[in-house]
Image (cartoon, rainbow, N blue to C red):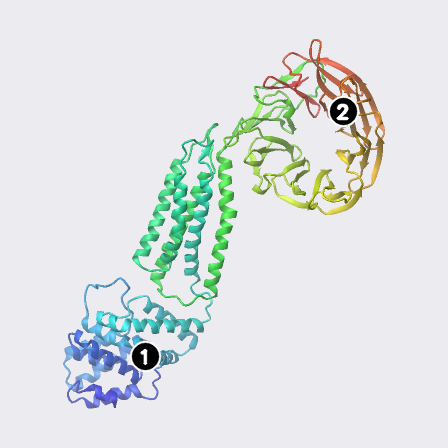
Amino acid sequence: MELRARWDDLVPESASLADELVARYVERTRRAYRDHYLGIVLTALDSFIQLSTDPTSVRLAAWFHRAVHEPGGTPSEDAEASARLAERLLPQYGVPPIRIAEVARLIRLTSDLATPPPDAYAPPRRDANGDVLLDAVNAILASDPSRYAVHTAEVRRDAGDRKIALEHRYDEVRELLDGHLYRTQLARQRLSPVARVNLEAELAGLDSELPAPWRGWQQAALTATATFTAIAAAVVAIAASGASWQTPAAQDEAGWPTVALAVLSFFSAPVLFRCARSASQRARLIAGAVLAIAVTGLLIAWAQAPRTNVAVGVGLRVPLLISALVLLLVAGAAALVASLLRTRTARFLPARNLGQQLAWLAVPGAVALILLLIVQPLSRSYVLSSNERVEGTPRDAGKAVPSVLDGSVAWVSDSVAGTGAEEAIGTRYGVAVPRPSGVVEMLDAATGALRWRYSRSDSDEKPVIAATGNGDYVLAQFADVGYLLLDANTGRRKAAWPGRTRDRYILQTQPLLTGERSGKLHGVDPGGHERWTYDSGDCTELGAIATAETVLTFVSHTCDDRPDEMTALDVQSGKKLWTRTSADTYRRPVVVAGLVVVAEPGGDSDAPAALTAIEPRTGDIRWRWDVPKAWACRTLLNAAGKYLIVVDCPGPSTQENRRTVVTAIDANTGLTAWQTLAPVSPRTKVTVTADGRVVSLGRGAGGCVANVVSRAGFRQVRLPTGISCSRDPRAVGNLVLTSGPNTVIALR
């Protein structure tokens, strides 16, 4: 009766038409769009009808727009069927054809209730009648919350399959919230606030009903990316401010750009967070501005990067600053994409679900991993590669001719200022020597000619070098750079050890062992990768030596009275094989013929009491060689093939003592193979060749002489002029090297 009263002679003599329409909306088979729905539409229409140009047509369209409704029917199907009903019934009551056409047109508009996008405030053509009708139809969105909940439940129940209905309705609500809910300004003012509250409440309820725990994770991930990459950019920019732009650092080097970038990145984080969560034009402009600043900064940094040469290198600030700008670029791009994505889908997202929470947790972790695993390694790699140079043409390496020490010279190298033979090392491809200002040179062992030169612009100190990998590589430690592995044949860098190994010290190079001051021992591959770690504990001093299969460690305790320990480890796996305690610490270990020979302490004397050969795999003592009690000097131990060469002095260690005794011990039996007494000062630095000759330099009446002690006895050879007697000789295999003024000299 209430609906019937609203007809109010809309069409003269049409009571039967009104009764038929009311009957359609209240029929028992209808589950949605019933009489209360039509009442809300007609009530709202009374508020907006003054905005229309044909109120009668609009009212008729409102009565007819859901006159036909089948369960599960779509809005377009209902609108088309209702329009045809109007076209069929209205002529019977004398409604003019032009009005019938307008009514049918308006009814068909209700097939799509989508509203204009947020920024479409002035469409090219206004449809006053259509805007009024559609705003009235959408007035159900602003109805009483309980009535609205009943209406939405009826619509979903009427749609059929519950899951499909929920998903379809979820998409509809998101689409409605993404735009203006009403077309007329009057409806926006009166209905929009309440309608949005109802829609947002419905969307939250739908989100809880739908099995979609990951909904919105993309938006959350983009927002988190924009926020945390901006913070990461600030952190990297702060790190860049403490580094130099070039090496060596220029006196007038400006530091304000990195500080400005750090401040900009830090304050960009909350701004980009808000931009990523907004669909406004302003948010996109701000995100785009940050993006443009990052791109401009990248171009400027790339153009201003210093050009490297022998004297000038690239500092760490260059890659760090570029990395900070790239991170800021990613932050701006993520905020811009998030803002655009929110515009295309919906400006409202339901409360955080599992997917969004995980996205907010995962993104900071991913950013931190990017800093540790990508930014830091790439920055270091850029500096390493930009500041290195390799000179020389690859060619076959010559084979060294053993020195017979006849007083002549085999070859003299080109100038190697600042270095000498005592720092040379032998490799499979020649003799490597370090030089000041970060240079390593490889000399041909047969001719002394330069094979290659590796130099670094970011190091002004002489590197410490060692041969490893069976002579295939040169391991060079550069100040402020760390350990670099160079190919002994070409000079090309094969690897750079990780930063955590920069402060370690090399205990042995073949096989490669490194130690730490904290009492840790590491088995390392030539490329710097750890195979295993052995920790001797706090308050310990750790030493080690290794054969091809076994590592023997010597541990002494400094904070308590526990006895010293000797432990054997597998060289490949670090597995402990055996442990033995002893009252005294073994000293001066040396590997000879697969055995480890150690010196037993001799009490207060610096000379050992005996030399003991240990089988490293089992810990068994193979033999023991007593050191004569009269020996009183340093007792040098060197390996030469199967022999242990022992250099000492018979008698007191005094300035008057001018004798040296050289003893060769067979490592397989522990017996003395030969012994030679030489009239040479025991304080003279000696070198031992691979065939067991002990060579030292001295000054004779006619100049520099070479003292040679071997199985054949002692002989003294006069050397040509130009050889420095005050510099130590160096044996590389059976090739004996000496030093000249800024040269390395090989003796024939």
Amino acid type of the residue tagged 1 in the rendering: Asp
Q: Position of residue 567 (x, y in %)?
A: 75, 43
Q: Nearer the viewer, residue 206 or 245?
A: 245
Q: Is residue 682 above or below residue 142?
A: above
Dot 2: what SS? loop
- Image quarter of the C terminus: top right
Residue under the image location 33 percent in, 55 percent down: 284
Neighbour tally class for label 2: few under 14, some 14-19, many 20 plus, Cα within 10 Å: many
The earlier-in-sequence mark between 2 and 1 is 1
> Horizontally, is 654 left or right of 484 in the view?
right
- Image quarter of the N terminus: bottom left
Q: Is residue 83 above or below residue 742?
A: below
Instruction: Quote the CA–CA distance across marks 2 and 1.
Output: 105 Å
> Horizontally, is 411 left or right of 597 in the view?
left
Amino acid type of the residue tagged 2 in the rendering: Gly
Q: Nearer the viewer, residue 172 or 632?
A: 632
Badge 2 is on which residue?
Answer: 692
Label 2–label 1 contact, CB within 8 A = no
Dot 1: what SS? loop
In this rendering, the label closer to the viewer, 2 or 1: 1
Q: Position of residue 198 (x, y in %)?
A: 34, 74
Badge 1 is on which residue?
Answer: 144
> Horizontally, is 685 left or right of 357 in the view?
right
Q: Position of residue 412 (x, y in %)?
A: 61, 17
- Res 509 → quadrant: top right
- Residue 67 in view (yes/no): no
Residue under the image location 31 percent in, 53 percent down: 285
Question: Which residue is the extreme one toward the top?
Answer: 702
- Residue 453 in view (yes/no): yes
The disc at residue 372 is none
Q: Position of residue 700 (x, y in %)?
A: 71, 11
